[in-house]
Amino acid sequence: MEMIRRLTLELRNKKPGEVKELVLDNCLSDDGKVIGLSSDFENLEFLSMINVSLMSISNLPKLNKLRKLELSDNRISGGLEVLAERTPNLTHLNLSGNRIKDINTLEPLKKLPNLRSLDLFNCEVTTLINYRESVFTLLPQLSYLDGFDADDQEAPDSDPEADGDGVEDDEGEEENDDYEEDDLDEEVIDDEDDDDDDLEGEEEEDGLDDEEDEDEDGEDDEEDEADDDLPRGEKRKRNLEDEGEEDPEDEEDDEDD
């Protein structure tokens, strides 16, 4: 797809002055130049033209509010003075995968006072001895080169304070404390339930023992009631038999015999 057609599709019936971000990646540029862009994109802050076969950025219009420019995987070898003239407030520039060979090619970037991040991955210049030290010396306004600062500390992805990471961590700790308290409460409840079960079991056993005692007492009472129904002589005889004694009347009968 040609760059002009892609640009029309990206506008989506908007006016150029209403666009803040514009992505034209992987389209075809005309003769290796920027086509279709104009200074009418006065509020443009982010522009991406990755892999569009650019050889020159001489046709780049005046974009005073542009902050981030993505130009990786093209054929740019020089002419960077255009950036200082037309994108004076640039803070991020990505030239990875282009044909930049010498440190001196980057000298025009000294005129970008707000430039904080520069990427030159897969450019021949990165193979030079003392490449990083030379670039940081040439461009003292830089904070990060190829994603690392002068002390080889990696650039943060985002601002922790802006993202509220610290707040989330505190909330996470509070949630963990709540979980631990809940777990302790559940353990206490489980122990109380176990104690209740033990008490219920003991009560049931006591109940069984009481029932057995009542049954034995009931049987004794029944035997006593049965004895009360017997004639007095029979009752006395039975009592003597239980005690292992003989009835005197039976002894008299034996003597008579």
Image (cartoon, rainbow, N blue to C red):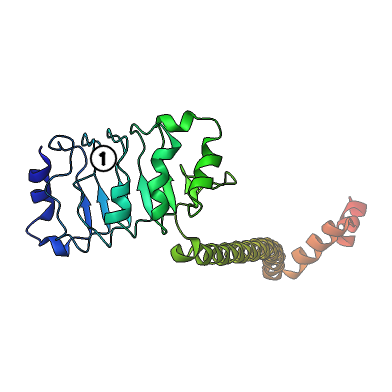
Where, by quadrant of the figure, is residue 216 drawn?
bottom right
Residue 99 location, x and y as percent?
Answer: 34, 31
Where, by quadrant of the figure, is residue 174 drawn?
bottom right
Question: Looking at the image, which is closer to me, 111 or 133?
Answer: 111
**Label 1 environment density (alpha carbons within 10 Å; few <14, some 14–19, many ≥20):** many
Residue at 16 percent of width and 59 percent of height = 39
Q: Which residue is mark 1?
A: 50
Visible residue check, residue 4: yes
Residue at 57 percent of width and 62 percent of height = 176
Look at label 1 and name its amino acid.
Ile
Visible residue check, residue 148: no
Residue 45 location, x and y as percent?
Answer: 27, 59
Question: Looking at the image, which is closer to me, 174 or 77?
Answer: 77
Where, by quadrant of the figure, is residue 180 drawn?
bottom right
Q: In the rendered image of this protein, does residue 49 appear above or below residue 219?
A: above
Residue 86 location, x and y as percent?
Answer: 26, 55
Residue 107 as seen in the image, left or right of residue 83: right
